[in-house]
Image: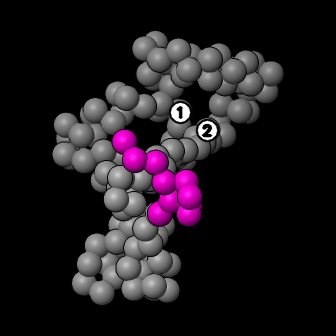
Amino acid sequence: MELAQTLNHLRKGTYLAYTKPSVQRNAKAMLLLAPVDRGLRAIARKYLGAIARNPLNLFRRLHLQSVTIIQPADVLCNGAMSMCDGCPDITVWNDELVWSCRLEEQMKFGCFVRAVPKAGTHRSN
């Protein structure tokens, strides 16, 4: 994944967030990286084993699944939340860029909600 992110960043100046379905359908090409990636080596071994058990598997498509891990919000001292840098799902709402995962707050309250300590639990530094 690190190699894919770096190559994409060097080529396009951006980082990958979601993989296109056309890429996910062509996972056999990823097996070419098996010599340099331990995880892909294990997948390649299993794939070759599947071909040995049933040679028709060679002609079937090999798919991959894309998993995106999104970091939780950082809560700042003033209660504001710092969201994901480079959000892949940012959208426009009332002429402002907003995180799509928090769009409901904008729609319901007209602003982002803020976190505040429970009564009696505030600690000062």
In percent of width and height, residue 78 lies at 34, 59
Horizontal and vertical percent position of residue 37 = 47, 17
Q: Hey, what amino acid is under mark 2?
A: Leu
Residue at the image point whose x is 30% and y is 53% from the top:
86
Name the disc covering residue 104, or none: none
| Label 1 close to label 2 by CB (< 8 Å) | yes
Image position, residue 112 (x, y; %): 40, 73
Q: Position of residue 35 (x, y in %)?
A: 46, 12
Q: Residue at x 37, y 29 (%)?
A: 2
Residue 48 location, quadrant: top right
The residue segment tinted magenta is 116-125
Residue to which mark 1 is pinned? 28
Which residue: 31% across, 78% down?
92
The kind of secondary structure element at disc 2 is loop
Quadrant where the C terminus sits is top left
Disc 2 target residue: 62
> Circle 1 sits in a helix, a strand or a loop, which is it?
helix
The question of residue 12 being in magenta is answered with: no
Location of residue 103 (image quadrant): bottom left
Rendered residue at 80%/21% (across/down)? 53
Q: Nearer the viewer, residue 37 or 79?
A: 79
User: Which quadrant is the N terminus positioned in?
Assistant: top left
Majority secondary structure in the magenta region: loop
Question: For this rendering, which residue is in front, 80 or 94?
Answer: 80
